[in-house]
Image (cartoon, coloured by chain):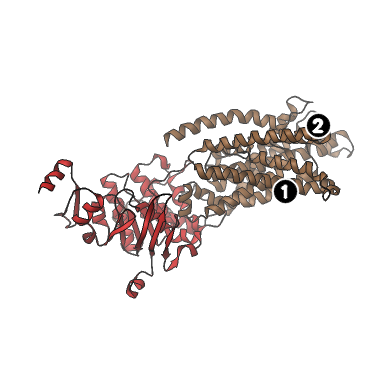
Chain colours: A brown, B red
Amino acid sequence: MSRDEAPLDAPRAGSAGGGHVRWGHALAEHLAGAAILGLVMLGSLLVGAVRIDPIAALRAPAESAAHVILVSARLPRVVLGALVGGALGLSGAGLQALLQNPLACPHVLGISGGAALAGILAMIAAPLLPLLAGGGVKLALVVVPVAAFVGALGTAALVQSVAGTSGRLTPHALILTGVVFNAFAAALITFVNSLADFYQAQGVLSWVIGNLTVRGNAWTGVVVATLVAGLLLLAGSARDLNALGLGEEGALGLGVDVDRARRRVYLGVALLLAGAVPASGMIGFVGLIVPHVVRIFVGSDQRRVLPASMWGGAAFLVLADTIARTILAPTELPVGVITALAGGPFFLVLLRRQSRLATVS
Amino acid sequence: MTSAGQARRELGLEARNATVRYARITALSAVDAAVEPGVVLGIIGPNGSGKSTLIRVLAGVRSLDAGEVRLDGRPLQAIARRELGREIALVPQETRVMFPMRARDLVRLGRSPHLGPFGWEHARDLRAAHEAMRRADVLELADRPIDELSGGERQRVVLARALAQEPSILLLDEPTTYLDLRHAVELLDLIGDLCHTHHLAVALVLHDLNLAAMYCDRLLLLSQGRVHAAGAPREVLTYRDLCAVYGTELYVAPNDVTGQVVVLPLARSFRERVRRG
């Protein structure tokens, strides 16, 4: 082959830098993400309705107001915000890659709504069932996330059946299905809410507009567990999600068992929401915005986008909650208000860009 | 089938009695085809004759309603998807990507079936991708975004992606459709070299019968989902068969330069003149 003798001094493989990812790179990027998140969390701890000198507060006796605010009020909330944000960012990145749809996120697709609806039903039904009645909080810790998981998975199956018939080239049909399902879920939640007694109704409302009021360390623990499981499932699908960038047949040709990859991603997303939604309700748009911002910095390789979206989502939600806590201090806004205010316009911009792309290709 | 025939076909890809039905129509009907190492098999036929379906069936991305496809004697369904990805590479008619990507990244996707689930690459993978780009002559395109490449450049990059899979079987669906004459012959020269020097088994769908005559060792002429004729180009590209399958009057004759068959479609005025004799 005469073309092989072209005067191109073949560079040593890999020395040209760029897109390859080895486990060392992955570790370094996780550390970088953790460092950024750490800084944001530290900043958030220092800001609030009450001004606190952190070092003095930590040295102060445990029952002092400053110590209590810092360690018992702010710290758990910042930690919960990071965990939930991580789960939402990660699930958004996974869904966008799987569906090849830049408008996808668990909220827009109605998967969060499905999780919330099932979770609320479980929360209200659990004390009514004689078999379950005695369990109290401990039982709810199992029943509610399991129900949310089932609800998320069921909605995901619905989304997939629409995506399967309409194909990846009509992203708007998919989004419409999500919108309709969200309205349906919201109506049902309101209906359930009017049936529930006053004490429970307060609980129901806190699911609808997401907020980061800590419901207890045990609930936060559930989020940790589901986040770890979801990260393993989604990051473990990175190779297949990259191949899916060439479409379903392209991925098949690259040796991807597409159905299995799909099940794994939906399972991961449902797990993430099973932890995040019972702990914080429906916080919208984090999973939509974060992967887009992340791709600006790390490119579109899913091996990078997925972990970075987790760290980015965590930092973003901590930041949003800091604003929610302080902007009208001492009144606190639900963080879902802040993310929706940021996410609405962002969605419209994406939609415009998406329509332009659709007409080009 | 004779035992000699079976022994010869033990290596490579073989479809037997392959049948595919869509809702109303039968796209492939009892098709036999063999893709063998060191042989370029051309799949030709008019629109809707089942060429693309056959190449997708051979690649294992479309399942069969009857019949079977065997890789080195083993039924495709019995082979794990990932292993198929290491043995068979498919170059589709068109490659679209959702998110922007550089040529190098597209080629590295070819390593997918060799990577673990987290997709971490080893030095071996980078070497294989580099070697594939060298063979497809796209090293100088490595850092270019693929949506900025010309049709010919992009098709060579996609070929490099297929070679990075290190397959033993290379399948191509109309690889020259969007290419001008020079880029078409250059791509086919390259594929022919890969087949004959590296003993790759190649099957490709071609629309252009003259390119098929020049580059293929064997041809499979499909008509309405059935094999109309199979064999060496000289045996398949006959005036009688081509006119019957394509349903129009053609000029078919050996050319002076290569001695191979030239097929020329004729405008109506010439068709009428031929018919009158």
Residue B109 visible in image? yes
User: Label 1: how many residues lie within 10 Å, few (<14), some (14-19) or many (20+)?
Assistant: many
Q: Marks 2 and 1: same chain?
A: yes
Q: Position of residue B5 (x, y in %)?
A: 33, 71
Taking B206 as reference, is B131 left or right? Answer: right
2 or 1: mark nearer the eye: 1
Do the residues under discs 2 and 1 have CB atoms within 8 angstroms? Answer: no
Q: What kind of residue is marked 2?
A: Ile
Q: Reply above or below: B13 against A57.
A: below
Which quadrant of the rendered structure holds the N terminus of chain A? bottom left
> Which residue sits furthest front?
B24
In this view, the residue farthest toward the left is B277
Q: Nearer the viewer, residue A226 or A165?
A: A165
**Residue located farthest toward the top when viewing the structure as drawn:** A328
Tag 1: residue type?
Answer: Val
Query: Between residues A232 and B210, which one lies in front from this camera angle?
Result: B210
Please name the residue that numbered disc 1 is placed on.
A146
Residue occupying the point 76% across, 35% down: A204
Q: Is residue B136 visible?
A: no
Q: Which residue is mark 2?
A: A52
Q: Residue at x 19, y 56 (%)?
A: B240
Q: Position of residue B123 (x, y in %)?
A: 50, 57
Q: Tag 1's secondary structure?
A: helix
